[in-house]
Image (cartoon, grey):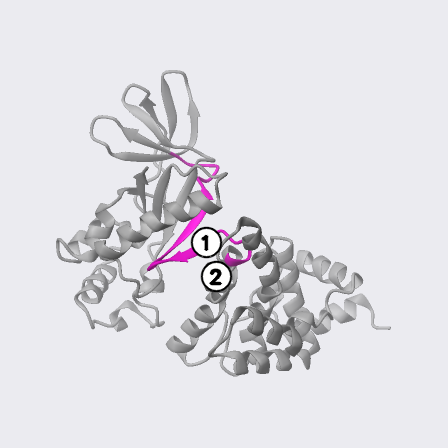
């Protein structure tokens, strides 16, 4: 019988994990899963399981052949089958980013490209059961399930090969739960204000002040305001007579997400907002939505320097009151400049927006994600 130590070492060598990726936490997780007989389970990569999902939910009208081939490759590779199951168990335990270092998707490594997909497909039936329990219509349920192929196709269209990348693996938790639904051109997530941020409004000028490390001190709030780029400013006082609480931890909100190439002109998005509010009021009656929010680079007020007044982008932004929030300043590289380059000087200049953004980044002047808030 192979020793646990040898089994784990072979697993790490087969996946070419780097020394810093081989943690004691990963080893403990691996050994527990192995002891429980979870690592060699091939259900989520079986052709029967995948064909059943296809028949019931029409998951892969375009990519079914590639998906089935990827599953076959993994079934024949013991180490990648274990990797798939570790990812699957992380999903099951709601610890998707805790234990396993994510293996980079590469064109010649079909197993690495598809393992994350099979890990999340294992929970399609659970998502279906939850949506059925809420009475959500079939066409909406199918649109949620079809998100998996859309995510894989995005990679294929951009780089020429199919894969579920780490970004979309983590994002898929929303479709597993599920708490996010495509409605019209946009996606809407039913969620709540995070536990460490409060948003205040200046009652005189209507400006928003997100604060952290806050406390209520009778006639005033004390806390550190979030600044442009997400850093915290010096602690200051906010008098209750001058500021009111707009959003606080636990408040139900409807978070807007903007797919690439979505039409965000007023005729589309305002209709989508109304449809979303009606949808969640009917199927999530326990939620009491206080605001529609959008945390996006499209909310940065300095975009007015990059696009024309009256453009769809500025019209979309002006629906909200905006304030600084968490941001890397790199969000545009997921939605505008999505193909990797060696340096900013190589960024494309095909549109006026690309040209304006490139100029800013060459000048070390990023566009940041802001939080947009529209109170209901």
Which residue is depicted at the point 64% across and 53% down? 93
Residue most extreme to the top: 218
> Where does the image place residue 304, in percent across and percent down from the top left?
17, 52
**Does residue 195 show up magenta in the picture?**
yes
Q: How many marks?
A: 2
Q: Which residues are magenta?
A: 175-198
* In this picture, residue 169 sits left or right of residue 313: right
Task: Looking at the picture, tell me which residue is in the foreground, 200 or 259.
Answer: 259
Which residue is depicted at the point 48% across and 37% down? 195
Which residue is depicted at the point 34% across and 68% down? 338
* In this picture, residue 29 sits left or right of residue 321: right
Disc 2 element: helix
How many neighbours does mark 2 have within 10 angstroms: few (below 14), some (14-19), or many (20 or more)?
many
Asked if residue 219 shows in the view, the reply is: yes
2 and 1 marks in contact (CB < 8 Å): yes
Asked if residue 20 shows in the view, the reply is: no
Disc 1 element: strand
The answer to which image quadrant residue 252 occupies is top left
Query: N-terminal of the two: label 2 or label 1?
Result: 2
How many neighbours does mark 1 have within 10 angstroms: few (below 14), some (14-19), or many (20 or more)?
many
> Where does the image place residue 56, in percent across and percent down from the top left?
57, 69
The answer to which image quadrant residue 86 occupies is bottom right
Q: Which residue is mark 2?
A: 144
Question: Mark number for residue 180?
Answer: 1
């Amino acid at each position: 019988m192979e020793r646990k130590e040898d089994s784990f070492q072979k697993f790490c060598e087969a996946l070419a994990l780097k020394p810093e990726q081989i943690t004691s936490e990963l080893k403990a997780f691996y050994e527990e899963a192995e002891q429980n007989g979870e690592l060699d389970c091939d259900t989520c990569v079986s052709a029967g399981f995948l064909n059943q999902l296809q028949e019931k939910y029409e998951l892969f009208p375009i990519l079914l052949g590639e998906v089935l081939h990827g599953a076959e490759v993994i079934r024949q590779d013991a180490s990648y089958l274990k990797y798939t199951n570790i990812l699957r168990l992380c999903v099951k335990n709601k610890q998707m980013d805790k234990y396993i270092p994510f293996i980079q998707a590469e064109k010649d490594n079909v197993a690495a490209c598809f393992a994350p997909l099979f890990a999340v497909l294992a929970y399609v039936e659970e998502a279906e059961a939850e949506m059925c329990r809420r009475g959500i219509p079939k066409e909406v349920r199918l649109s949620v399930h079809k998100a998996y192929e859309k995510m894989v196709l995005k990679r294929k269209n951009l780089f020429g090969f199919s894969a579920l990348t780490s970004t979309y693996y983590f994002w898929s938790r929303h479709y597993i739960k599920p708490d996010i639904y495509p409605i019209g051109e946009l996606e809407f997530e039913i969620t709540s204000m995070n536990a460490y941020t409060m948003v205040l409004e200046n009652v005189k000028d209507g400006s928003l002040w997100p604060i952290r490390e806050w406390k209520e001190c009778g006639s005033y709030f004390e806390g550190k305001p979030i600044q442009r780029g997400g850093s915290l400013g010096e602690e200051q006082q906010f008098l209750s007579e001058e500021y009111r609480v707009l959003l606080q931890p636990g408040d139900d909100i409807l978070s807007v997400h903007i797919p690439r190439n979505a039409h965000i002109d007023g005729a589309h998005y305002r209709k989508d907002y109304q449809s979303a509010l009606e949808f969640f009021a009917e199927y999530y009656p326990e939620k009491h939505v206080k605001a529609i929010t959008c945390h996006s680079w499209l909310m940065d007020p300095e975009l007015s320097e990059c696009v024309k007044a009256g453009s769809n982008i500025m019209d979309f932004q002006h629906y909200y009151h905006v304030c600084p929030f968490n941001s890397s300043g790199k969000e545009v590289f997921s939605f505008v400049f999505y193909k990797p380059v060696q340096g900013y000087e190589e960024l494309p200049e095909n549109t006026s927006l690309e040209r304006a953004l490139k100029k800013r980044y060459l000048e070390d002047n990023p566009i940041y994600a802001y939080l947009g808030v529209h109170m209901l």
